[in-house]
Image: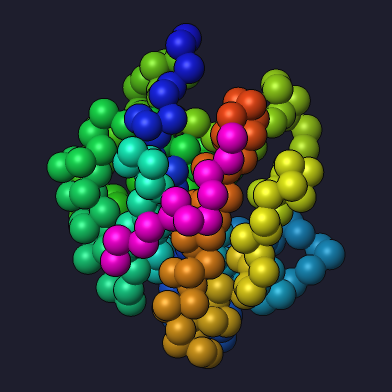
Amino acid sequence: MPQTEINNILFLDIETVPLVYDYKQLNEPFKKLWDLKWQYNKEITAEQQYAKAGIYAEFAKVVCICVGYFNGKEFRIKSFYGEDEKILLEDFKLTLERHFSNYALCAHNGKEFDFPFMCRRMLVNGISLPDILQIQGKKPWEITHLDTMELWKFGDYKSYTSLQLLAAIFNIPTPKDDIDGSQVAKVYYEEKNLERIKTYCAKDVVTVARLLQKMRGEQALRDEQVVLTN
């Protein structure tokens, strides 16, 4: 398969939070379902496990999606964020269909997290999937999505390598210089600071683009090339 041109790749990252901040805020049906999910784990209680709720699409929602793409010498970033998940997902879908239908998507751990999470939350919100995210029934070689973590594995499926670690290895500025993924829920619910989450998400997108360039032996984009479009 020929290598996808860098100008035909849409780099992406999402930020998610639990639907409710605290385990005790879950309504009874969902509390029972969460408990059932962890019933065989004897080392930690279901309530303690709730710190991980933001990564499960059945118990969480998207609060920010940032995309980045090369446009000439610029790397342009557009963000979709807000408290109303349905609105931001609809806006994201419309942008994909209007401007990026022929692009390949690229994210770090995107095939395991970002892409399926967005698909699940779109369906929950009654939104039909855009063609670029419609992968059901396709053979693996028919899917054009790129995943920098998968590329780094070289077929080794035993380990997870964080974006932060790969940034350090390739001498790329860390995107975790303010907050990291484990703090997003606190920033959203306690600080109510979506702008801070958006900035963090955008930094991840830049880092993923730089990482792919480094993996390809290309010169990584410079700070002055990054343009925020909203």
Q: Position of residue 17 (x, y in %)?
A: 49, 70
- Segment colored magenta: 219-230
Can you say which quadrant of the picture contains the C terminus? bottom left
Residue 228 within the magenta-colored segment of the rendering: yes
Q: Residue furthest top?
A: 1
Note whether 130 is above or below 87 in the view shown: above
Note whether 128 is above or below 46 in the view shown: above
From the viewer's perspective, tell me whether residue 97 is left or right of residue 199.
left
Q: Quadrant of residue 81?
A: bottom left
From the viewer's perspective, tell me whether residue 50 is left or right of residue 120.
right
Residue 10 within the magenta-colored segment of the rendering: no
From the viewer's perspective, tell me whether residue 183 is left or right of residue 92.
right
Residue in the foreground of this view, choosing between 44 and 100:
100
Q: Position of residue 203 (x, y in %)?
A: 53, 60
Residue in the foreground of this view, choosing between 57 and 199:
199
From the viewer's perspective, tell me whether residue 92 is left or right of residue 117.
left
Q: Position of residue 156 (x, y in %)?
A: 75, 25
Residue located at (21% from left, 58% from top):
91
